[in-house]
Image (cartoon, rainbow, N blue to C red):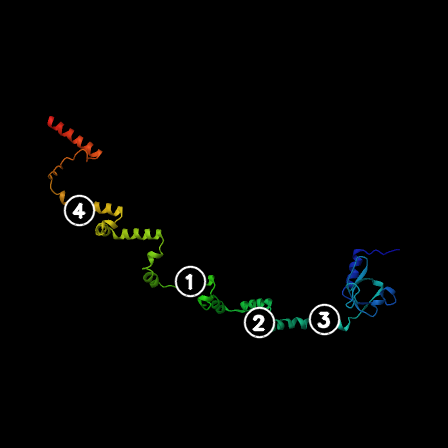
Amino acid sequence: MNVKRFSFDEVEELKREWTEKWVEVDGTRPELKRFSNRPGRVITVNMSGRALVQFDDADGFGWGRFDISLPFLKQVAAPVAAAKAKEEKPAAEKAKPAAAAASEAKPASKMSPIELMRAKAAAKAAGSDTATQESTAPEPKPAGKMSPIEIMRAKAAAKAAGTESSTTGEAAPSESKKMSPIEIMRAKAAAKAKGGDAETTTQPEKAAEKPAGKMSPIEMIRAKAAAKAESAGPAAEPANPPAAPAAGPKSPEKMSPIEMIRAKAAAKKTTEEKGE
């Protein structure tokens, strides 16, 4: 069987001639009798020179596209139904925005999740600057209906909106309660630097006012040092203060080892002085 071979250029020429054309088959051919009086549209022409024809009403034969030789096809005018479909297509495209607007006009209870998302997106896109400002400042909800994140945001907003008077006046009594240990130490250091000598002079008096049972060891040492410094002032005025009366010698049994060593050293020194 001799089969004609088509070149690439010939196939391209056939495509330009037959693609998107309406055709009818030769009803005298037995294999094409089922397509007689039934218009079809040429999708393309393959490399073997046969047209791929699509019949909209295929009666369940395959998927409605068939490979038919070009000699058994003749070009016809587009059917009325196809012309009407082409005319109705632009009208359907124009009706889509109206349908979208009608879907947006549905109540929220009857809208699907996708429609709700589309309606929200459209409202967000059409919103003005005032709408965005209103969205950033929502109405305060009652504390019982607020989520933890909303509660945190409300607290942050209230804290940011606080005036200077509230931060300096009302926060002062509770400052030490809310301050960290490092902040307390820094505040004390700043107060100490500002106080100067006034604080250093009043500190021993405050420590002395406390009873000995409630004073810490450091406070007791400071109180003793302050008392010693006060007593040393008037005692240092005479040039040669009288020697303190010698305490009576303790018995060796009551003396500590250090006192015994000191007593021996003192006795040795006195004997040396007498010998001279």
The crowd level at tag 2 (other Cα within 10 Å; few <14, some 14-19, many 20+) is few
Pointer 4 residue: 230
- Helix, strand or loop for disc 1: helix
How far is disc 3 from disc 4 in space, using C-alphas?
115 Å
195 in relation to 119, above or below: above
Q: Nearer the viewer, residue 106 or 54?
A: 106
185 in relation to 137, above or below: above
Return the disc, 3 or 4, that comes first in the chain's sequence: 3
Residue type at mark 2: give it: Ser
How far is disc 1 from disc 2 in space, using C-alphas?
34 Å
Pointer 2 residue: 109
Return the disc, 4 or 2, that comes first in the chain's sequence: 2
Q: Quadrant of the C terminus?
A: top left
Q: Position of residue 182 (x, y in %)?
A: 35, 51
Q: Left or right of 269: which side holds 214?
A: right
Instruction: Find out whether the residues at labels 3 and 1 contact each other: C-beta distance under 8 Å.
Output: no
**Residue 72 figure quarter:** bottom right
Residue type at mark 1: give it: Lys
The crowd level at tag 3 (other Cα within 10 Å; few <14, some 14-19, many 20+) is few
Q: Left or right of 2: which side holds 271?
A: left
Q: Nearer the viewer, residue 182 or 231?
A: 231
Pointer 1 residue: 155
Instruction: Find out whether the residues at labels 3 and 4 contact each other: C-beta distance under 8 Å.
Output: no
Pointer 3 residue: 86
Residue at the extreme front of the image, as rendered? 253
Return the disc, 4 or 1, that comes first in the chain's sequence: 1
Mark toward the viewer: 3 or 1: 1
